[in-house]
Image (spheres, rainbow, N blue to C red):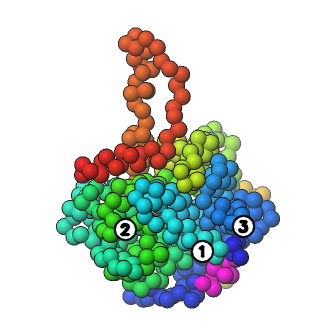
Amino acid sequence: MPVGTYEQYYERLLKMKPNIYLGDEVIDRSDPRLAGGIYVMRQTFDCAHDERYKDVCTATSHLNGETINRFTHIHQTVDDLLKKQEMTRLLSHRVGGCIQRCMGIDALNALSVVTYEMDLDLGTEYNKRFMKYLAWVQENDIVANCAQTDVKGDRLKRPYEQADPDMYMRVVETRPDGIVVRGAKSCNSAAPYVDEIIVTPTRFMGKNDFAYAVSFAIPADWPGVKLACVPGLRHKRSHIDAPIAHVGDMESLTIFDDVFIPNDRVFMNGLGNPECTPYAGFLALMFAHFHRHSYTGCKPATSEVLASQAALVAEYNGIEKEGHVKEKLCHIIGIAELVYAAGVASAYRAEKSPSGTMIPDEILTNAGRKLAGEEIYNEAKIVSDLAGGLIATLPLENTFYAEDNVGELLNKYIMRNPAIPAEDVHRCFRMIQDQIVNEFGGSMIVAGLHGGGSPQMEVIAMMSRYDINELKGIAKYLAGIQADIPIYRRESVTPRKVLEKYRQMHDKR
Ligand SMILES: Cc1cc2nc3c(=O)[nH]c(=O)nc-3n(C[C@H](O)[C@H](O)[C@H](O)COP(=O)(O)OP(=O)(O)OC[C@H]3O[C@@H](n4cnc5c(N)ncnc54)[C@H](O)[C@@H]3O)c2cc1C
């Protein structure tokens, strides 16, 4: 059944082998510390069956015309890109931030493009393998993440120059039936509760880096895969249960300790075929690109979550009509709208790659993602500003229900406007504490900054694609240096066009 259910997903998790390292414990997928992340994934199944959301949360497979979960779909049209963005926003509202399943759809779309190009240019069979894998993913509504970020060692050295050659994921052996890989992927979100980990390179690879040009997909509990994890948890509630209290995550530093990957799951192997090497950077870029486009859906949602919390706490504090409050709310709302608009515009300027996959415009996507990343701390600052210090110092939940009169007194002293019950005020402050003060909240804010690449990566993507000479033409015309200027109509820029550049760079490095 191509639109799977939460129950099927959870049943699969329970069958997986324990390989989750939490301190001195090795746990399996039934551990309650995984519940927050599993709750988030559940939304992606439940909403695909919900009449209200079906239209955005499902898609028509281009492989067989069946209705599938949109998280397993390869974008075929502008409408697909717009719906993916809408779905991401919708689901992110429901969980107060990251929906955690976009890494999988972004990696699948990137692989659909890059494996096709490799087969076309190099006569490999990577796309054939990938299409079989994709059919299985769609048929079973498989949950995947993406392990792109290598641990990287010395940031200024190329993979082959590192003191320890394992600082980037590499192929250590090619066998007739598969490859053996070694390395570690950092910041690997949701790894403990996904079915599959999809591995892609993290950067451009030069000709000496050929063994590092590797991509594959593997079950998250595969022999030799070790998940060294940190849970993102929220305080357990005993009296004022709320959706936000159920949300959590688990991040992993995922170690591949000489792991055998069978051929049918290998989508790039530079050790076996060094000609693949320029495609490593292309794949890294394509994943980041699709992921940044997903950010134009989730990040506006996160901004709207923060704006909604700021607006509510301002009302409860009795300050909502003050001029500075309106200005601060307007700032967050404006950012959310602009980032979403960048995603919409980049979908309308998308280009169909030879594989048939729709690739959004690169400059618009990066411009949106960059703005979102730059603003995340500012948005959290606005919420803290309007809420006041209580979000950091709120007494524990149970104290509000203490049997002696302390509970009663707390409910008296938390009051602001007599028309707003003490419990609602308590719920509001507890929610904001969960959102931005506690450990998990902090980690999500860092994700807003670094996810899909550090802010500098968006600058590099934009500035290496943008035609500065054409831009300078405007100044030259105004200064009288140049006779005329053409109508300014920037061509759509998509990563497909940079593959050629990568091929040239590859030979030089
Ligand atoms: C909560 C969270 C979840 C994440 N989830 C995922 C995930 O699921 N999958 C995944 O693959 N990744 C994930 N990421 C990783 C994210 O993509 C990276 O954090 C990001 O790409 C930055 O890489 P880094 O953390 O290694 O930092 P670094 O690359 O070390 O960056 C630190 C600083 O160094 C600068 N820098 C780095 N290299 C150079 C250089 N050569 N020259 C000049 N300056 C340089 C950067 O610009 C930055 O300012 C996640 C991150 C977070 C925080």
Whether label 3 touches label 2, CB < 8 Å: no
Q: Secondary structure at mark 2?
A: strand
Q: For residue 317, say whether it is visible.
A: no
The residue tagged 2 is: 269
Quarter of the N terminus within the rendering: bottom right
In the picture, the disc for residue 328 is none
In the picture, the disc for residue 136 is 1
Residue 423, image x, y percentages: 71, 68
Q: CA distance from mark 2 to mark 1?
A: 22 Å
- Report if residue 8 lies within the magenta region: yes
The residue tagged 3 is: 66
173 relative to 413 in the view: left or right: left
Q: Quadrant of residue 153?
A: bottom left
Numbered range of the magenta stretch: 5-12
Residue 333, image x, y percentages: 62, 45
For the residue marked with disc 1, what is the amino acid?
Answer: Trp
Q: Residue at x 72, y 66 (%)?
A: 67
Nearest to N terminus: mark 2 or mark 1: 1
Q: Secondary structure at mark 3?
A: loop
Residue 496, image x, y percentages: 47, 47
